[in-house]
Image (spheres, rainbow, N blue to C red):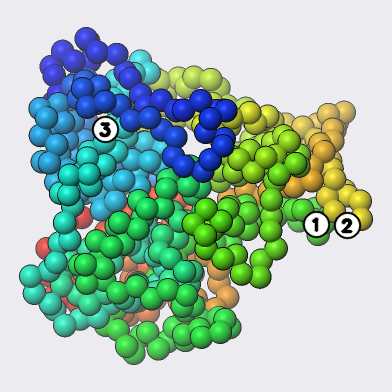
Amino acid sequence: MGKITGFLEIDRNERKYTPVAERLKHYREFVIPLSEKDTRDQAARCMNCGIPYCHGTGSVAPGTPGCPVNNQIPDFNDLVYQGNWEEASRNLHSTNNFPEFTGRICPAPCEASCTLNIDDNPVTIKTIECAIVDRAWDNGWLKPEVAPAKTGKKVAIVGSGPAGLAAAQQLARAGHDVHVYEKFAKAGGLLRYGIPDFKMEKHVIDRRVAQMEAEGVTFHYGVHIGGTAQGAIDPRELLNQYDAVALTGGAEAGRDLPIPGRDLDGIHFAMDFLPQQNRRVSSEPLGEAKDILAGGKHVVVIGGGDTGSDCIGTSFRQGAKSVTQLEIMPEPPEHENKGVTWPNWPLKMRTSSSQAEGASREFAVLTQKFSGVDGKVQKLHCVKVDDKFKPIAGTEFELEAQLVLLAMGFVHPVHEGMLKTLGVDLDQRGNVRANTSDYKTSLPNVFSAGDMRRGQSLVVWAIREGRLCARAIDQYLMGSTTLPR
């Protein structure tokens, strides 16, 4: 694939970012795309390796090498190298409903498993993927794919994150009457309300939703399924109204930090903070929620993952005086041992674009208590920990903070409301129990996919599960299916 000697002749060339001082002034995307020539040169580096781990085994289980949606990466690299962009788009969309999402926010396990990553020069797969789909949109190649015939079957999708959207699009294209129920004002789930606009602007979601509506998907916004919110629908009614129901909500129960001082004002979950700014950018009302803002404050983010990184970038754009990120895990090595890790996803030091905007990062730190004045948080009382997360005597220190954001991950979906009312079985981690062969829950015509089933995970895994769940539902309703895996 690509140019036979391309990897020997052409160096890796990744997309660049606009300067920090410039991008901190706004919430727009700041990645600078490669030119067409540079993108084709990068595609030329794909080396026709014997076993392309980039797309070979990623769907088996988390941690295995390659792309979870099985993108045919060598194939679309070759098509780009040859200048056949439209066919590259068809190839890419044959496995991934939303490559414009993954081309912006996926951590790219495909690149970690690239044969050229053995010497730290993998093909810029994510960059090429994003270039393909953006060109496809710009050229009007992504038309609605309306089913030639309707099946007469109705399917309800609860939750419009990437798993729900992927399942809905696949089922609509199979001819089913698909209705998506979303509790918020717009579709997208964490794509819209969690991921900041500077990582992915929301018109990227809007154009996909418009495509899906043209394909026959009906979206119901501001509708709670279960719970006590005004106008909430009893989830058991869906079982009577629809031939199948897919539960594709997120893992929304955040991991808390129940230590002394937790009730002080100024300590918030990341997912109380991030959606507010996304709503401000899109001029969506906050309702009765109290503003959570970082402007003029010393901010501490507890949690070293992507959510914490999003809190950092948002805080800087709001005008924070300083941002410190705390991670309880030890500082990872700068470079992995390729002989041990490749082609699997390695644990190594990574610096996100937000962290590079000026955050201070502290590893192996445990917060023992918060303290404040007049009911408002002012300090964190911390200690260094050993490799068993035990406090090390004599390493205690304090951090000033007027805003603390808890970004320590999510434990499972919210149980109150829909899940308890339906009575679906949960697994030992508190997720909806459903296997990966048919995605059926303990109720006969109820299915589940994405974070609600597997727990907190990647957008690309949610898309994968949504596609497979749609295939399972189509099989259940029709006795057979032609939907791809």
Q: In the shown orientation, is residue 368 left or right of residue 471?
A: right
Residue furthest to the top in view is 9
Q: Are marks 1 and 2 in contact (CB under 8 Å)?
A: yes
Most foreground residue, 444 or 19: 19
Most foreground residue, 100 or 91: 100
In this picture, is 351 found above or below 310? above
Q: Amino acid at mark 3?
A: Ile
Residue lying at 59% horizontally and 43% vertically, measured from the top left: 314
In this picture, is 165 found above or below 191? below
Residue furthest to the left in view is 148
Residue 43: which quarter of the image?
top left
Q: In the shown orientation, is residue 25 left or right of residue 169?
A: right
> How many numbered circles does the render carry?
3
Q: In the shown orientation, is residue 208 left or right of residue 410?
A: left
Question: How far, Cα to Cα, is label 1 from label 2?
Answer: 6 Å
Residue lying at 69% horizontally and 55% vertically, measured from the top left: 292
Q: Amino acid at mark 1?
A: Asp
Which label sits on residue 402? none
Q: Amino acid at mark 2?
A: Gly
Regarding mark 1 in the picture, which secondary structure is present there? loop
Residue 91: which quarter of the image?
top left
Regarding mark 3 in the picture, which secondary structure is present there? helix
Precedes in sequence: disc 2 or disc 3: 3
Q: Position of residue 420 (x, y in %)?
A: 53, 79
Precedes in sequence: disc 3 or disc 1: 3
Residue 315: which quarter of the image?
top right
Q: Residues within 10 Å of mark 2 (few under 14, many from 20)?
A: few
Report the residue marked by disc 1: 265
Q: Position of residue 468 (x, y in %)?
A: 26, 60
